[in-house]
Amino acid sequence: MPQYPFLSEKWMVAARKIRDEYGHKAPGVPPIALNLVVNDVPFGDGSLNAHIDSSRGGLALDEGHLDKPDVSITTDYETAKALFVDQNPAAAMQAFMSGRIRVQGDLTKLLALQDVAGTGSAEDGLLVKEVAERVKAITKV
């Protein structure tokens, strides 16, 4: 399976394909409109704007920002990779405590999103794990 640098254009295309396969099966994902700014990206202009939107059912993950997000997160590339690819919640807590993650907006919605795999059924948890493994598989280390 081809691998690409995290958040690169080719990675985003491959991630969208995964999203398209699983997006309609986003069990237990609470409604949220989240904007994300990732700094220190090792390509392009060094910064990437993206969003996650589950407010209309399913799960949309794409580039660009939403007009009216519930919450906005700004972080660095390595922290974003630890969160979205490695699924490392300890890295998230450490980054938040050290100021490498800045949050604006409704923190309760973000916290509800944090534990999606742990709050649904066993089948939901397996689906979340399967998607995470597929994302890891397309990501160059």
Image: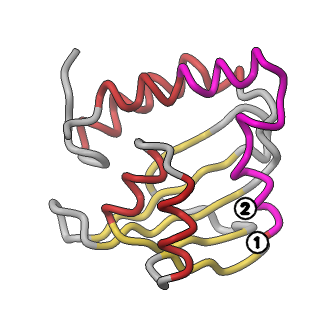
Q: Helix or strand or loop: what does disc 1 sit on?
A: helix
User: At 72% across and 61% down in the image, what residue appears?
Assistant: 110
Horizontal and vertical percent position of residue 32: 75, 54
Residue 63 within the segment the image draws in magenta: no
Residue at which label 1 appears: 107
Residue 126 sits above or below residue 33 on the image: above
State the separation of the CA atoms marked 2 and 1.
5 Å
- As rendered, which of 78 and 32 lies closer to the eye? 78
The three-letter amino acid code for the residue at tag 1 is Leu
Residue 32 sits above or below residue 102 on the image: above
User: In which quadrant of the rendered image does the C terminus lie?
Assistant: top left
Dots 2, 1 in contact, CB < 8 A: yes
Residue at which label 2 appears: 110
Dominant secondary structure (helix, strand or loop) of the stretch shown in magenta? helix
Horizontal and vertical percent position of residue 105: 73, 78
User: In which quadrant of the rendered image does the N terminus lie?
Assistant: top left
Determine whether, in the image, residue 6 is placed left or right of residue 28. Answer: left
- Are there few (<14), some (14-19), or many (20+) residues within 10 Å of tag 1? few
Determine whether, in the image, residue 79 is placed left or right of residue 20. Answer: left
Name the mark on residue 98.
none
Answer with the quarter of the image where residue 29 lies.
top right
Horizontal and vertical percent position of residue 58: 72, 32
User: At 20% across and 28% down in the image, what residue appears?
Assistant: 3
The three-letter amino acid code for the residue at tag 2 is Leu
Answer with the quarter of the image where residue 14 lies.
top left
- Are there few (<14), some (14-19), or many (20+) residues within 10 Å of tag 2? some
Horizontal and vertical percent position of residue 111: 76, 60
Specify start and end residues of the magenta stretch as a single range: 108-130
